[in-house]
């Protein structure tokens, strides 16, 4: 089973990379962008075939390694 | 006094730290990250570098390595653990010290000498040191200290701030903050003050002909405090 997770920076955390991307987009003529926030995407292929168990395991992975909960949120966006 | 320096894959200040510790009288051992047990130590150092290529988040992989279980047990039972630069990043990832280290505010790798003001001398690291301001070297891309408002209050209430970036006279104003750290924080302790994480490298300031001697002051003072 493949589980997809995104990790995003929490709202109050400064994202200098997102800011620079925003400025560059602006310079390229994409002037209607309000803000850009950069995040991470993981695709985890697991042997677990039970959807709920697989999701639970991936949540544990997020809490323990993939995300730092002081500054980041995680969200499982797809499982198939 | 016995010390141990942990080498992770990608550590690159481990040898410098070994040289510094030995110069000031420590009997130092290099310990590989995949070992399970720490040798008997009075001080454990997590050195600078780029452990695991800084993948995922700086220090995140190293914080899960085998030796870190022993290091955490050692720290939790009152042992002295010091993390420098990447070592500081590893410490925050273990949760031994609060907060995180974000990308530098202006997205530059910063490599230069800085001044830091010692904020708290009631601990084994800085007790009895005459100077209030030390000149150290920084070299990092992710040294922008960040924590939540609640954490900051707790850190300040418990006097966990160790050093702040400042100018040569000890002024800790925003203009002397190289990387965007909250309140110019360059180093912090755990609650008990036996664990210290800091971005600056004292081990790069132990030779007057190469750099400076404020690192010598630091290590000399540290070993005397440990005796």
Image (spheres, coloured by chain):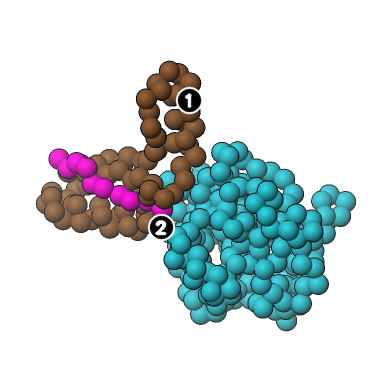
Chain with cyan colouring:
B
- A46 or B209, nearer to the observer: B209
Image position of A17 with respect to B144: above or below: above
Chain with brown colouring:
A
- Disc with the residue nearer the chain's start (2 vs 1): 1
Give how far apart the Cα atoms at labels 2 and 1 are.
Answer: 28 Å
Residue B205, how many percent across, how many down?
78, 56
Residue B102 relative to residue B213: left or right:
left
Mark yes or no: residue A10 visible.
Answer: yes
Image position of B103 with respect to B169: above or below: above
- Outermost residue to the top: A29
Image position of B11 with respect to A36: above or below: below
What secondary structure is found at the residue carrying circle 2? Answer: loop
Mark yes or no: residue B52 visible.
Answer: no
Residue B68 relative to residue B168: left or right:
left
Mark drawn on residue A70: 2
Mark drawn on residue A51: none
What secondary structure is found at the residue carrying circle 1? Answer: helix
Residue B200, how many percent across, how many down?
67, 55
Residue at x-position 79% and y-position 59%: B169
Q: Residues within 10 Å of mark 1 (few under 14, many from 20)?
A: few
Instruction: Give the residue at mark 1.
Output: A24
Residue at x-position 37% and y-position 40%: A39
The chain letter for the residue carrying disc 1 is A
Assess whether residue A72 is covered by the magenta stretch. Answer: yes
The chain letter for the residue carrying disc 2 is A
What residue range appears in magenta? Answer: A71-80
Residue B179, how many percent across, how many down?
61, 47
Q: Residues within 10 Å of mark 2 (few under 14, many from 20)?
A: some
């Amino acid at each position: 089973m493949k589980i997809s997770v995104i990790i995003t920076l929490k709202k109050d955390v400064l994202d200098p990379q997102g800011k620079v991307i925003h400025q560059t987009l602006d310079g390229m003529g994409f002037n209607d962008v309000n803000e850009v926030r950069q995040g991470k995407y993981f695709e985890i292929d697991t042997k677990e075939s039970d959807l709920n168990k697989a999701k639970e395991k991936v949540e544990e992975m997020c809490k323990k390694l993939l995300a730092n909960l002081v500054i980041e949120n995680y969200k499982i966006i797809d499982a198939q | 006094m016995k010390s141990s320096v942990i080498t992770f894959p990608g550590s690159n200040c481990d040898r410098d730290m070994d040289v510094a510790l030995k110069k000031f009288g420590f009997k130092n051992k290099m310990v590989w990250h995949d070992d399970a047990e720490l040798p008997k130590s009075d001080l454990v150092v997590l050195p600078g570098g780029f452990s695991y290529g800084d993948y995922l988040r700086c220090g995140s992989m190293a914080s899960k390595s085998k030796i870190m279980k022993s290091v955490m047990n050692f720290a939790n039972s009152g042992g002295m653990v010091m993390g420098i630069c990447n070592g500081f990043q590893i410490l925050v990832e273990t949760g031994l010290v609060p907060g995180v280290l974000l990308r530098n505010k202006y997205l530059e790798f910063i490599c230069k000498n800085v001044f830091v003001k010692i904020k708290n001398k009631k601990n084994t690291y800085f007790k009895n040191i005459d100077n209030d301001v030390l000149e150290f070297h920084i070299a990092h891309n992710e040294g922008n200290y960040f924590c939540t408002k609640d954490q900051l209050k707790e850190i300040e209430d418990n006097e966990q701030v160790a050093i702040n970036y400042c100018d040569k006279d000890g002024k800790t104003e925003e203009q002397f903050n190289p990387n965007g750290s909250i309140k110019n924080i360059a180093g912090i302790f755990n609650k008990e003050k036996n664990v210290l994480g800091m971005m600056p490298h004292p081990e790069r300031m132990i030779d007057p002909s190469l750099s400076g001697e404020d690192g010598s002051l630091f290590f000399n003072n540290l070993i005397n405090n440990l005796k």
